[in-house]
Image: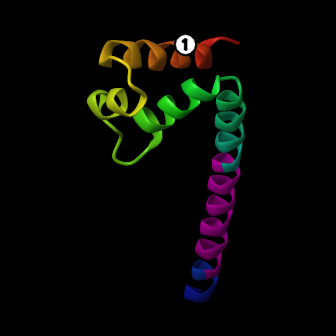
Amino acid sequence: MNGKIGLKMTQTIKRRINVNYEELFKRRELLNYALGCLSPREHKIFVERRLNEPPSTLLVVSKKYGLSRERIRQIEMNAFDKFKKP
């Protein structure tokens, strides 16, 4: 009986892993599609501020691009708003 329970648990775990990979793949596709809607500058800034680990600070990004921190924040927010639009 223990062998059957172990087998069922293994099968259940494999199904859950497959579902997690499918979900991860779908999310990556959606993220890549959304990033493709951004200008090159928006894309770079959004990745640096939101997707990098650890994310770059406004100060670091502003110095890199020669823009004010406020302008970097605006570009980041504009990019984020584009993700929200259908």
- The residue sitting at 42% across, 28% down in the picture is 65
Instruction: Give the amino acid type for the residue marked by disc 1 in the picture.
Output: Asp
Q: Which residue has dot 1 on it?
A: 81
> Predominant secondary structure in magenta?
helix
- The residue sitting at 61% across, 15% down in the picture is 82
Location of residue 57 by image quarter: top left
Q: Is residue 12 magenta?
A: yes
Look at the picture and state if 70 lies above or below 50.
Answer: above
Label 1 packing within 10 angstroms: few (<14), some (14-19), many (20+) = few
- Foreground of the two, 29 or 49: 49
Q: Secondary structure at mark 1?
A: helix
Q: Is residue 38 magenta?
A: no
Taking 40 as reference, is 46 left or right?
Answer: left
Look at the picture and state if 12 lies above or below 23.
Answer: below
Q: Which residues are magenta?
A: 7-24
Q: Residue 86: horizontal and vertical position, in percent?
A: 71, 12
- Foreground of the two, 57 or 8: 57
Look at the picture and state if 21 lies above or below 78.
Answer: below
The N terminus lies in which quarter of the figure?
Answer: bottom right
